[in-house]
Amino acid sequence: MNDKTMPASPESKGAMRFVLLIGVLSFFADFTHEGARGVLGPYLASLQATAFIVGAVTGFGELMGYALRYFSGRFAEISGKFWPVTLCGYLLQMTAVPALALTHSWQSAAVFIVLERTGRAIRNPPRDAMLSHAAKHIGGYGWTFGIHEACDQFGALCGPLMISLILVHGGSFHQAFAALLIPAMLNIIFVFIARRLYPAPEKLEAGNTETATTTTFSHIYWVYLSGASLVALGFADYPLLAYHFTREHIITVDWVPVLYAIAMGVSGGSSLLLGRLFDKYGFRVLISLTFITAFFSPLVFYGGVVGCVVGAMLWGMGMGVHESIIPAAVSPMTPPSRRASAFGLFTGVYGIFWFIGSAVIGFLYDDSLHLAMLFCLATQLASLPAFIWVYIKSKMAK
């Protein structure tokens, strides 16, 4: 019988339902926090924040959103409380976003921006570890995380579009943030549903009975982390790009979330394809895409209207690569019992470099647009030797 006509096994059906259910709750999560994120740059600017403040605040938010992940993942790993940790993270994040409607200074807004990222830090490692257990039944890690990222980014497309619609019809930033309470509540509902239906997702991974026998990770893991950190160092956060668009009058404020939605649409759409390609071709996909997406910065900073649209699309593709291929690549490098820590440590270091890079890019931008662009381009291209080394070592290991 042809494999294509064979019915799916109960295990694969259950695994796919779990991935899709996590995708639905992630859709509403991204609808909420990315809806706000698309206008944070102009909002902070309206509160008299400089480019450096925008870069530092959003960068520090990313620092908290990543640096705390190791502790979150490690705690979930040791305690076995994957769902409670995940729920706490979602509750904090989904509360912080609508609370931006209550802010009237960049300092108070900064508090909730950082709290939102902190909630994201708490919930991501245990959620990704649970999600990884479904991969073997539905085609691979790249496909699993690609499906999840596509759901994520579909929400990230819809959220900014709703915010843009509110602003176009004369609504204020505060009204837009308040409207995000609805998808935030839906997210929490689906978290409880997922917890009820799949209380022990680790059972989805057949034969997952091993226990961690080492506290260290492989050399490949660490070299891969060094390359990803360089990518993060030069990956400008969207609020800073939005600040540039509005300061230079390239596009108007109400079009900023639309452009962000386009970037997120590209990110989500490409995640499915990139996940499949990664499962088939491995690190060759990551190497090629890192080179291509590195050129978002000259397009965004020098390209005018057309350049900023194309550059934002490349930026969105880069975001999809980071959010889907990174966990897909880390999963096979570590045993199932250590994945929460592996995800947490990896993304924690990644976030520290993102914070440093965001602050540096904002500082350079205030002084020289050329230096800001060169910093983004050079640091991302500098990651390629590390990825090439990982690719070679991975091929030799097979």
Image (tube, rainbow, N blue to C red):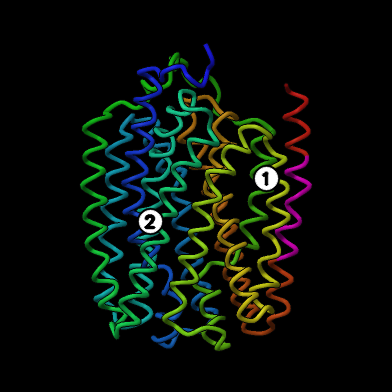
Residue at 69%, 48% (x, y): give it.
227
Residue 19 falls in image quadrant:
top left
Q: Is residue 391 above or below residue 103?
A: above
Q: Is residue 61 above or below residue 286?
A: below
Left or right: 340, with 299 as reference point:
left
Residue position for label 2: 155
Report the amino acid beneath label 1.
Leu
Closest to the observer: 181 or 87?
181
At numbered mark 1, what does the secondary structure look like: helix, strand or loop?
helix
The vertical placement of 146 against 100, above or below, is above
Q: What stretch is highlighted in magenta?
A: 377-388
Q: Is 128 left or right of 347, judged from the image as shown?
A: left
Can you give x and y, in whole percent of width and height, for residue 221 in the image? 64, 36
**Image coordinates for residue 374, horizontal then vertical, percent:** 74, 71
Label drawn at residue 286: 1
Q: Where residue 277 appears, x then y in whole percent?
A: 63, 38
Task: Identify the image quadrant of residue 240.
Answer: bottom right
Q: Are marks 2 and 1 in contact (CB under 8 Å)?
A: no
Image point (72%, 46%), residue name: 287
